[in-house]
Amino acid sequence: MEPKKVLVIGSAGKIFSDAVTVDIDPEHHPDVVHDLNVTPWPFPDNSFQEIVAHHVVEHLQDFASAMKEMYRICSKDGCVYIEVPHHTAWFAKDPAHKMFFGYFSFDGFIAGKTGWVTGRKFRCLKREITFHKFYRALFLHRLFNRWPLTY
């Protein structure tokens, strides 16, 4: 059997038959139990074609180390998908969240953008602020994604 090429970090108990899952909580039954605050992560370099981090990185103590680990374990032609709550969202202020994110929060990790992050950087394929469907009906997402400083 061919090794799985997708990694889902912070699986929160969801089952992914086509992916390797990693979570800190063994009760979520991940494939790998690991605290993502501890580096290096238990995966070899370039081992995944895709990494999915859906509402996970805001819970980590060291966001920069997590980004470096994702860069390290993702293949050179792979894709990393990260979704975080915008700092204005009602659930962004959850006590379990260690960081708050805005439209430009990842700029330091993107090639061609200036910032304090050094070393290897990602190529940004897409970024957007998403909204609840009620607000999407008002087309606010188009306005705020076109001019993110207005939000």
Image (cartoon, helix red, strand yellow):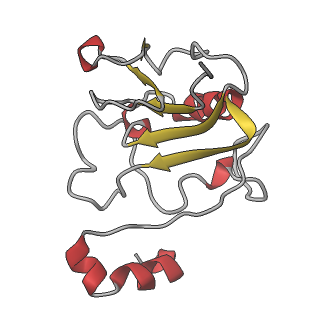
Residue 67 lies, with reference to residue 130, above or below; the image says: above
Quadrant including the C terminus: bottom left
Residue at image position (23%, 14%) is 27
Left or right: 120 as drawn, with respect to 41: right
Residue 91 position within the rendered picture, expressed as x and y whole percent measured from the top left: 22, 51
Tally the marks. Answer: 0
Q: Classify residue 144 as left or right of residue 136.
A: right
Q: Can residue 147 be spotted in the picture?
A: no
Does residue 116 appear left or right of residue 52 in this picture? right
Q: Quadrant of residue 126?
A: bottom right
Quadrant in which the N terminus appears: top right
Q: Is residue 31 above or below residue 72?
A: above
Q: Residue furthest front?
A: 1
Report which quarter residue 131 is drawn in.
bottom left
Q: Residue at x 35, y 56 (%)?
A: 87
* Identity of the residue drawn at 26% across and 20% down: 28
The answer to which of 5 and 137 lies nearer the viewer is: 5
- Rendered position, 6 above or below 89: above
The x, y position of residue 149, in whole percent, is 49, 76
Q: Position of residue 71 (x, y in %)?
A: 68, 35
Above or below, 108 against 45 in this view is below
Toward the viewer: 37 or 82? 82
User: Which quarter of the figure has residue 10?
Assistant: top left
- Is residue 142 at all visible to an observer of this figure? yes
Residue drawn at the location 52% of the way across and 31% of the way down: 7
Q: Position of residue 117 (x, y in %)?
A: 70, 42
